Each structure stands twice: as C-alpha cells, then as structure tokens.
C-alpha cells in the first residue's frame, strides 16, 4: 500500500494501551483476530510481528486493523494515536458511554435511543429535530416496541471509498430497514453486459458504461427499493448517486413519486477526504477500481470533496474514517445495553 504521511500518528500510544490492558503482543493479536472475526473485519495476520510494526511506527495500520483496535480497546482513532481529531470530535469514546444504564435499568430503551440520536448528530452535525434522525430512532424503537409504520427511502451517496456502504450497514443494523447495495445487486449483470457489448467487465468510466450500463444498474436498484417500499418496508440504498444528487429535478421527481405513495425520502451524503478514499479503495482491491488507481490524479480532479450536493438532507463527515469508527463504538454500546 502506498505510504502517506499521517498527521498526528503516535505509534507509542498503541503500545501504551496494550500494556495498560496487561496484554502481550501474542495475546493482543489473538484478541484482535477474535474482535475482527466477530465484527466481519479483515485482519489477515494480526501476529506479534504485525502488531510490533504498528506499535513502532514501521507500518501504519490499515482501515480494518484500526477499526479492530478501536473495538478491542474501546477507544477512538485519535485516542489510540492513529490521527489527530477532527474539529469537535470526541476523543475519549469510553467517557461518552460509561454513564449508560445497566441492561436491567428500566430506562434502557430510552438510553439506547439517545445513544443512536447522539451518534448521528455527532457524525452529521444535524440538529436533534432533523426528521431523518427522528425516523432512525423511531425505527429502532419499532424493532423493540412500537413506532411509525410509514416507510422511508434513504439514499446514501458518496464517492468510491467514502464509507457509504459501511454507514448504510450501520443504519440498517439500527433500524432493521432493508439494505440495498448497488454493486451487490448489479455487478454480475453489469460485468456480463459490458462483455457482451465488447467492453471491459471492470470498466466504470467509459462512455459505454455510462450510457449503456449505468442507467440499468440504477434502474435495478430503484426497482428493488420500491418492491420493498410497496410492502411497507423501508429501504436504505448505497450507491454513488453522483449524477442523480446534483440534479434537483431528479430528486424532486423521486420525492413526488414517493409522496404519492405515502413514502418519505431522505438523502445522505458521506463526505470523505481524498487520502482516506484512496486507502479504502486500495484496501478492498476491487477490479472495478483499477482505472481510478491507475489514473488517480485525473480521477480526483473531478471530485468535489469540500461541499455536499444541495439535495442532501444530511452530510455525514467520514473524513479520516471518523464516522465509521463512531458507528462501530455505537454498535458495541447498543449490544451492552441490550445484553
């Protein structure tokens, strides 16, 4: 993986956390692998040599390693010395969850809802009265009690490697809403179609893909979403939605179509920095990203990472992986509340 300067990286902090927990390098590696497996993360080696390299600054931990470390030590990335905190980011995660009531507390349901709401407010900067935040909390309550049956369509957009898929999974975990990822739904079809048209199956940038294949991908995604919505099931859609969200008319047509069927619409844009996006793209190693990586400067020249589309209702700040790290911690908090 390409080496990138890491502002605020302090490898010694990772060693201090391990020693404070009384773990040897071997024991920490065993625990890290268990944590990664439990949360569906990839930490291929997690042996003592790898952990030693992380703690001595020889190798900067990849995204899944950092997430696993945060979960294992119950700390944020800045608290573990991986990076500097973003403005307003809470560094000591444990302090924000230590005062939650025990599982036997009768206020458990209310406390869990508050954790969810505060998490979404932190990553998006949205006020507590934001309609989508209210609906997410309501959906969680509905899974464990009662809530509004009115379905909602949530579009989660962002550039490749921004973290939109992970954040969509997080929302789905909380709400129980259907999670529909464009690549998972359409990739086999798109690749076969590109080959049949004489193209590269991994092409995602040529006029052939953009005019002949991309429209069909989004049609499949939207049709599948409405199949869920028509039976009263809310849906979260993860896709770039770049062309769609910069077109107010497209969003307006979708909103009107949904309103006619009693369906709400919410648009989330996941913001991320270019360096972190490259790290995620390199880490996942998908063939469809080959052109982006080979032409990185050309590709990123066309990205707007400073502002969100005007059609977005909420912007999730995932620069330096901050939102995904907080989502991991929130999942753990809810598990402890409901245990």
Image (spheres, helix red, strand yellow):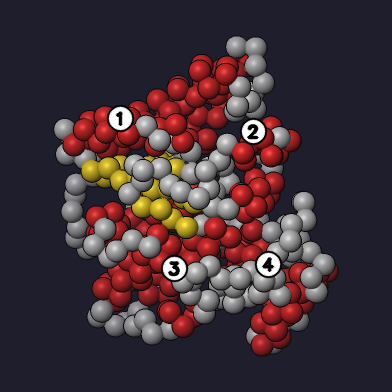
Q: Which mark is residue 330?
A: 3
The residue beneath circle 4 is 7
Mark 2 → mark 3, Cα distance in angstroms:
31 Å
Q: Is residue 263 left or right of residue 11?
A: left
Q: Nearer the viewer, mark 3 or mark 4?
A: 4
x and y percentages locating residue 324 in the rendered image:
51, 60
**Nearest to the observer: residue 176 or residue 242:** 242
- Residue 290 horizontal/vertical position (percent): 70, 34
Instruction: Say few, some or many: other residues with alpha carbon within 10 Å of mark 1 (under 14 / 14 to 19 / 20 or more).
Output: few
Numbered disc 4: secondary structure: loop
Q: Which mark is residue 277?
A: none
Crowd around label 3: few <14 · some 14–19 · many ≥20 (10 Å): many
In primary-sequence order, the first of circles 2 and 3 is: 2
Report, in whole angstroms, how far the alpha carbon at label 1 lies from the one at label 4.
41 Å
Q: Are marks 1 and 4 in contact (CB under 8 Å)?
A: no
Q: Secondary structure at mark 2?
A: helix
Distance between mark 3 and mark 4 Cα atoms: 26 Å
Task: Find residue 326 and report its horizontal and vertical position in percent.
Answer: 48, 66
Q: Residue at x 30, y 42 (%)?
A: 153
Q: Which residue is mark 2?
A: 288
């Amino acid at each position: 993986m390409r080496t990138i300067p890491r502002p605020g990286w302090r490898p010694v902090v990772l060693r201090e956390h391990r020693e404070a927990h009384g773990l040897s390098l071997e024991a920490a590696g065993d625990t890290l692998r268990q944590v990664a497996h439990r949360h569906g993360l990839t930490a291929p080696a997690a042996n003592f040599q790898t952990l030693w390299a992380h703690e001595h600054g020889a190798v900067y931990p990849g995204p899944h390693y950092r997430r696993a470390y945060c979960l294992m030590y119950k700390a944020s990335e800045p608290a573990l010395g991986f990076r500097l905190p973003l403005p307003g980011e809470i560094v000591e995660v444990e302090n924000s969850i230590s005062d939650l009531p025990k599982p036997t507390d009768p206020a458990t349901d209310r406390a869990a809802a508050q954790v969810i709401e505060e998490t979404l407010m932190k990553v998006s900067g949205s006020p507590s009265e934001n309609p989508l935040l209210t609906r997410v909390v309501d959906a969680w309550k509905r899974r464990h009690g009662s809530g509004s049956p009115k379905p909602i369509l949530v579009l989660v957009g962002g550039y490749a490697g921004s973290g939109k898929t992970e954040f969509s999974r997080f929302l789905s975990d909380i709400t129980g809403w259907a999670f529909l990822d464009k690549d998972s739904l359409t990739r086999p079809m798109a690749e076969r179609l590109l080959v049949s048209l004489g193209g590269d199956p991994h092409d995602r940038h040529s006029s052939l893909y953009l005019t002949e294949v991309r429209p069909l991908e989004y049609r499949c995604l939207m049709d599948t979403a409405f199949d869920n919505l028509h039976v009263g099931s809310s849906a979260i859609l993860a896709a770039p939605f770049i062309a769609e969200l910069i077109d107010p008319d497209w969003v307006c047509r979708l909103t009107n179509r949904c309103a006619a069927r009693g369906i709400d619409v919410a648009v989330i844009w996941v913001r991320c920095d270019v360096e972190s996006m490259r790290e995620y793209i390199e880490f996942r190693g998908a063939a469809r990203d080959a052109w982006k990586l080979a032409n990185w400067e050309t590709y990123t020249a066309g990205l707007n990472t400073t502002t969100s589309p005007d059609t977005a209702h909420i912007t999730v700040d995932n620069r330096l992986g901050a939102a995904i790290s907080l989502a991991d911690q929130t999942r753990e908090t809810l598990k402890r509340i409901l245990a």
